[in-house]
Amino acid sequence: MSVADNTNNIKNEEISSVSGVTIFTKENCIYCDAAKAVLERAGIVYREIPIGSYPELWKIICLKYGWKGAPLVLMGNKPLGGFPELCIHFGRKSIFERGERSLEI
């Protein structure tokens, strides 16, 4: 299967889905790792899509949702946001509150 075919499958199966959680990540991204940890601790099953492997899909997602950086968490076909928004959604303190620099949640 080609990358284009794989991108189309992801687009059709995951992005248009009304259920499920998808997280777009990039390599060596501490916020992406932290976002995945929040989802895992909350017991959420998610699909990870590495943006480096699907650059054309990432361009489409950025245009569709007005997003610029990783991670991006979609709940169904609605964007939740990145790591800070995910923390807020699950009632955890964001790393951006009180000027903290720790990723501990």
Image (cartoon, rainbow, N blue to C red):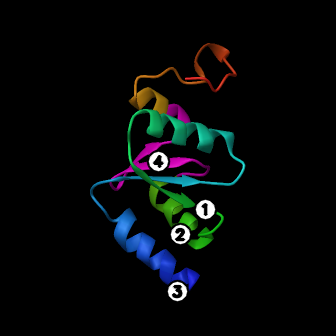
**Is residue 82 shown to the viewer in this render?**
no
Residue 1: which disc?
3
Residue 79 lies in magenta, yes or no? yes
**Badge 3 element:** loop
Precedes in sequence: disc 3 or disc 4: 3
Say what amino acid the circle numbered 2 marks. Answer: Leu
Rendered position, 100 above or below 18: above
Q: Residues within 10 Å of mark 4 (few under 14, many from 20)?
A: many
Label placed on residue 51:
1
Q: What is the C-alpha distance between the residues marked 2 and 4?
A: 15 Å
Amino acid type, label 4:
Val
Between tags 3 and 4, which lies in front?
3
Q: Which residue is mark 2?
A: 57
Q: Nearer the viewer, mark 1 or mark 3?
A: 3
Q: Is residue 104 above or below residue 41?
A: above
Which is nearer the N-term, disc 1 or disc 4? 1
Which numbered disc flags the more N-terminal residue, 2 or 4? 2
Give the residues drawn in magenta, as a range: 67-85
Q: Which residue is mark 4?
A: 73
Give the CA separation, mark 1 to mark 4: 12 Å
> Could you tell me how far apart the alpha carbons at marks 3 and 4 are, in whole angstroms?
26 Å
Residue at far left of view = 18
Q: Nearer the viewer, mark 2 or mark 3?
A: 3
Neighbour tally class for label 2: few under 14, some 14-19, many 20 plus, Cα within 10 Å: some
Amino acid residing under circle 1: Ile
Residue at (37% x, 73% y) in the render? 12
Q: Position of residue 23 (x, y in %)?
A: 49, 52
Sooner in the amino-acid sequence: mark 1 or mark 3:
3
Q: Is the C-beta separation of discs 2 and 1 under 8 Å?
A: yes
- Could you tell me which quadrant the C terminus lies in? top right
